[in-house]
Amino acid sequence: MTRRNKIIYWISTAWLALGMLSTGIVQILKLKDEVTLMNHLGYPLYFLTILGVWKILGVVAILVPKFPLLKEWTYAGFFFAMSGALISHFALGDAAKDFFGPTLLLILILVSWYFRPADRKVNSI
């Protein structure tokens, strides 16, 4: 892995981890804006706790060494959560500003996944 790719990986992964950790905490705490958003999207409020816990556990899985299969599943889970958020906003015809957060996190997920080092990839047979 080149030095450039390592830098891209760690910058995108750090920003991804920060974004997922911060939104996970906000969701677990059920802050007013998050509750309002979930009500607007039509999801039950217990989704906040589920998503928040999964995001925090996902950050741990992405950052710890080893466990490449767990990392692969974590990237997939992050991808499904953020693409689901985008689709939910799109389905309700929300304003463009509502797409920024999920789109940014989706880009960070893809960049981090693409540039991950060999020891963080699942080896194919």
Image (tube, helix red, strand yellow):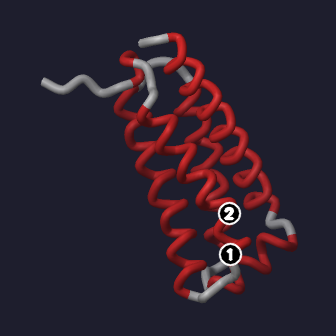
Where does the C terminus fall, quadrant-wise?
top left
Q: Residue at x 79, y 57 (%)?
A: 26
Which residue does the numbered mark 2 point to in the structure image?
100
Q: Which residue occupies the foreground of this view, 27 or 101?
A: 101
**Picture layout, residue 110 above or below residue 48:** above
User: For this view, does 9 lie left or right of residue 113?
Assistant: right
User: For this view, does 32 lie left or right of residue 24?
Assistant: right
Q: Which residue lies furthest to the front in this view?
A: 4
User: For this view, does 59 lie left or right of residue 75?
Assistant: right
Which residue does the numbered mark 1 point to in the structure image?
96
Q: Is mark 2 on a helix, strand or loop?
A: helix
Residue 39, given in percent of the width and then of the height, sits at 71, 84
Q: At label 2, which amino acid type do we have? A: Phe
Residue 50, given in percent of the width and then of the height, sits at 60, 61
Q: In which quarter of the image is residue 102?
A: bottom right
Q: Residue at x 53, y 32 (%)?
A: 62
Q: Which residue lies furthest to the right in this view?
A: 32
**Picture layout, residue 124 above or below residue 111:** above
Rounded to the nearest whole Å, what is the CA distance between mark 2 and mark 1?
Answer: 7 Å
Q: Is mark 1 on a helix, strand or loop?
A: helix
